[in-house]
Amino acid sequence: MTAHTTHSARVSRALTSLRGLAVGDALGSQFFVPAHYSALQSGELPPGTWQWTDDTEMACSVLAVLVRHGRIDQDALALSFAEHHDFDRGYGPAVNRMLRLIRQEGADWRELAAGLFNGQGSWGNGAAMRVAPLGAWYAGDPVQASHQAEISAYTTHQHREAVAGAMAVAAAAALAADPAGPQDPPGLLGAVLDLVPRSAVQAGIRRARDMLDYADVATVAAVLGCGRRTSAHDTVPFALWSAARHLGNYEQAFWTTAKVGGDVDTTCAIVGGIVAARPGGEPPAAWTERTEALPDWAVMS
Ligand SMILES: [Mg+2]
């Protein structure tokens, strides 16, 4: 067992990524407050404490299960999602209903997740938005990161695109968290592509890699999508493009991702979780202080 694979090293890395995810989610969601919108567009920070949303709440469960089980246990993960589900955190209607049924009526996540959208499963970005800390947990082992991410996705999102999106985000975080990992943006996205099954997500990441030298962010977001349809394939390629271009610079990563709009809390949660997974990529301390604290059950677990 080398130093970076000890339990405490895994926990500390995943927690750092989770904090980056939470700041991205919380500050990103401020873009939906009409009074803050113009200030944010010019790069000013909104007042008050920024509350995180479903992205962070679910990511806390991913970390808690890894800490307790050392891998993804699907039953434990689905139960944790349901137990900690807060209706006011901005979940999509399908997941809201599903988690309520599991908690209040003891329903089986396997049946519910498989039955969503007439049996196709959800292709939403919800499995990708919560999984960067898992990648940080498996730093330097992107194969295992994408495998565990796949397992984690099925608890709520069973459509191939949603699963591929989660695998891609976890692989990117595992590679970013590894000091010996790819050092440049094309290398990072190339290594991710090797681990993602054939899918629209994969095609999108390939296009994202082709556009890494493209300076006009709005055009890149228009081509790749930035979560306006809240699907995995409309969210993950742009988030990876932005994370790859800004490894080591959380602030720039955030503003680049947020200013193009779309599903901003989720794109910024993904980018924040990946960028913060890399040593030196944490959000500014002032941003972390303004972000609502993580729940005790996630941090103490
Ligand atoms: Mg959200």
Image: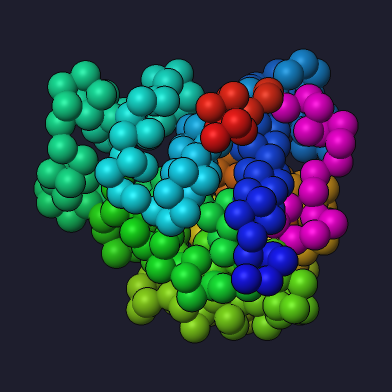
User: Residue drawn 63% across and 23% down?
Assistant: 51
In this rendering, the answer to whether 220 lies above or below 262 is below
- Residue 78 located left or right of residue 278: left
Q: Is residue 166 left or right of residue 176?
A: left
Magenta stretch: give its range. Answer: 276-291
Q: Position of residue 15 (x, y in %)?
A: 66, 44
Residue 144: % across, % down: 47, 70
Residue drawn where x is 39% and y is 20% of the image: 87
Q: Residue at x 68, y 23 (%)?
A: 292
In front here: 54 or 175? 175
Left or right? Give the position of 103 relative to 276. left
Q: Nearer the viewer, residue 150 or 126?
A: 150
Colouring used for the render: rainbow
User: Where is residue 214 shown, x and y percent of the image?
Assistant: 73, 73
Residue 28, position in %: x, y? Answer: 66, 36
Is 101 in the magenta? no
Q: Is residue 284 visible?
A: yes
Q: Is residue 300 above or below residue 244?
A: above
Image quadrant in which the N terminus is located: bottom right
Farthest residue to the front: give it: 1
Q: How many marks?
A: 0
Q: Residue 299 sits in which quadrant?
A: top right
For the C terminus, the image quarter is: top right
Is residue 232 in view from this perspective? no
Residue 174 is drawn in which quadrant? bottom right
In the rendered structure, the answer to whether residue 58 lies left or right of residue 189 reads left
x 36%, y 42%: residue: 77
Question: Residue 136, located in which quarter of the rendered image?
Answer: bottom right
- Establish if 172 lies above or below 67: below
